[in-house]
Amino acid sequence: MFSFLKGHKPLKSFSQTGEDLIVNFIKDAIHLKDFSYLDLGANHPLKYSNTAFFYKMGYSGVCVEADPLLCKKFKSLRPKDKVLNIGVGIHDQKSMEFFVMTSSTLNTFSEKEALRYSSYGNEKIEEKIKVDVKTVNNIISENFESYPNFISLDVEGLDYEIIKSLNFKKFPSQILCIETLSYTQNKKERKIKEIIDAVIDNGYMLFADTYINSIFVKKTVWENR
């Protein structure tokens, strides 16, 4: 966490590299008074969270986390949020196998990614559990009157597939923050350009990039601010 000055008032970031403060700047610039969020792959309610800042500001949203232990922390520390102990599926399957890693930030539904993380030597698959899943479109339609203003997406290995499945026409959220860096321990990480291109192709502009995450704003909304 670090602080960022806005006038004379310090703002404390909960994100990994200040993404929440960038999103807050966009929110103010496009004059969003009502604000809601969807946190997909929410992980911890405070540490490295892209939505904790907004919760502390008095907003609320929907947090989706497959790990039941992390969900309990959310319900304890962020009781005004709606917490869904499910995963984000791509198709219409009812459940998927979830790989709980040594570091919870690397928990994933992708066996390929779980095995890759394990191959570095510092991580291992601690547990495999069956978790109910819903598509991102169903999650939004079932939990929002229209759509969230802000979507944070970090699901370790399935981000591109989820973005490709998202119905942008029906759910044109104004701001997106997506992890676009592949995780490695051998310093050979890469930017996942396919995700960036897919979002831009759906009418967004890349507003900022923190290397780990890319932050997008709906192009027409920014131009008409």
Image (cartoon, helix red, strand yellow):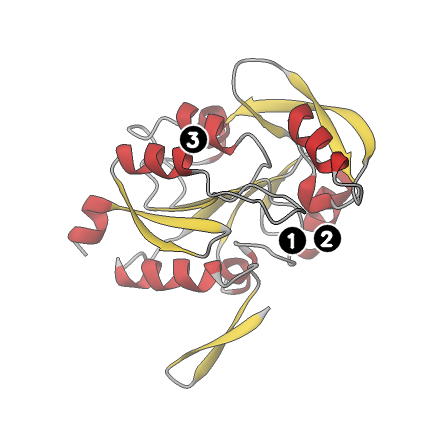
Q: Secondary structure at mark 1?
A: loop
Q: Amino acid at mark 2?
A: Ser
Residues 152 and 124: in front is: 124
Q: Residue at x 27, y 62 (%)?
A: 29
Would you name the residue on which mark 3 appears?
Answer: 163
Residue positioned most to the bottom:
8
Q: Left or right of 105: which side holds 63?
A: left
State which tag comes first along the sequence, 3 or 1: 1
In the rendering, which numbered label is found on residue 45? 1
Q: Secondary structure at mark 2?
A: helix
Q: Rate crowding at label 1 as few (under 14), some (14 to 19) or many (20 or more) other CA atoms within 10 Å.
A: many
> Distance between the Cα atoms at labels 2 and 1?
9 Å
Q: Amino acid at mark 1?
A: Pro
Q: Residue at x 31, y 56 (%)?
A: 32
Query: Which of the image's four quarters has the N terminus?
Result: bottom right
Tell me the mark number nearer the camera, choosing from 2 and 1.
1
Residues 90 and 142: in front is: 90
> Distance between the Cα atoms at labels 3 and 2?
30 Å
Q: Residue at x 75, y 46 (%)?
A: 103
What is the x, y in percent for residue 107? 70, 37
Would you name the residue on which mark 2 appears?
Answer: 76
State which tag comes first along the sequence, 3 or 2: 2
Query: Which of the image's four quarters has the C terminus?
Result: bottom left
Q: Secondary structure at mark 3?
A: helix
2 and 1 marks in contact (CB < 8 Å): yes
> Distance between the Cα atoms at labels 3 and 1?
23 Å
